[in-house]
Image (tube, coloured by chain):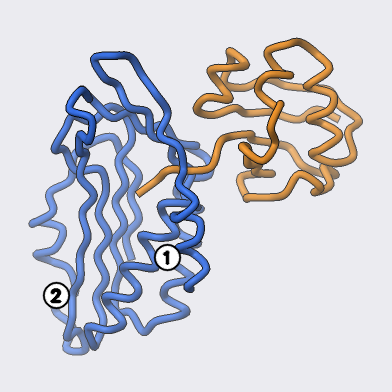
Amino acid sequence: MKVSVQPEPFDLGAELAGFGAGRSDVGAVVSFTGVVRDDSGAMEALELEHYPGMTQRAIAQIVDQAVTRWDLADVIVIHRHGRLGIGEQIMMVATAARHRAAAFEAAEFLMDYLKSRAPFWKKEHGRDGTSWVVAKDEDEDALKRW
Amino acid sequence: MMVDVLYFAWVRERIGLPREQIETQAATVNDLVAELRAREPRYEAAFADLTALRVALDQELATFDSPLADVREVAFFPPMTGG
């Protein structure tokens, strides 16, 4: 299991290359990467603030829940903070399991919980000023399916 | 008791500082919020709508009716937008 909260970019390929390697019980690897997008056409950067003391622990607790629920061989969560440009990677989740259903479901579970329960706050910097991204009701609702 | 109170995102911006030490006898988070709101208009503005806020006690998510006994760090912030 790997949890990293960092300002630096990560190398998705390198992370996945060694993931689940050397194990004979891994039949499925799923990964998700979140990328900074610009919906308005006027955005210049996305700033991610976080709660340094809490973030690592909150993510580790979410990973623990996933591991309890699904039979996972390994998990990676990398989440960046700081100021990120359009097209930059924000975060990644990877799950390794015996079968794909567990790998997909666990990855979705991790994403849903990271979105609403990991202490990050996004602020959009645009040509017209700055604004905090507002949490969506549907993101909170997404937790109910688990 | 002394507690460290931390603010994040727009709560931090509205109050104008990231953290402060507060001497309080508040029994619950709600009591602490009432004390803060009575301080100055910027606190009143930040805490005007508690449904727009979340709270963590010693870095664990909690509710506004949670007791503050033995708590060292209280953090207020808007709903999280990770991922």
Q: Which chain is orange?
A: B
Relative height, residue A144 to residue A92 (above, below): below
Relative height, residue A13 to residue B73 (above, below): below
- For the residue marked with disc 2, what is the amino acid? Ala
Q: Which mark is first along the chain, 1 or 2?
A: 2
Foreground tag (2 vs 1): 1
Lateral position of residue A108 relative to residue B35, left or right? left
Q: Which chain is blue?
A: A
Q: Position of residue B20 (x, y in %)?
A: 67, 20
Of all chains, the one bearing label 1 is: A
The residue that mark 2 highlights is A21
Viewer-closest of A26 and A48: A48
Q: Position of residue B81 (x, y in %)?
A: 43, 43
Lateral position of residue A117 relative to residue B40, left or right? left
Structural crowding at the residue carrying mark 2, measured as other residues with C-alpha within 10 Å and reported as few (<14), some (14–19) or many (≥20)? few
Q: Secondary structure at mark 2?
A: loop
Relative height, residue A19 to residue B25 (above, below): below
Q: Secondary structure at mark 1?
A: helix
Q: Which mark is residue A41?
A: none
Of all chains, the one bearing label 2 is: A
Q: Are marks 2 and 1 on the same chain?
A: yes
Q: Position of residue B77 (x, y in %)?
A: 58, 34
Q: Is residue A57 among the parts visible in the rendering?
A: no
Task: Name the residue located 35 percent from the left edge and 55 percent from the top edge.
Answer: A3
Q: Quadrant of the N terminus of chain A?
A: bottom left
The residue that mark 1 highlights is A63
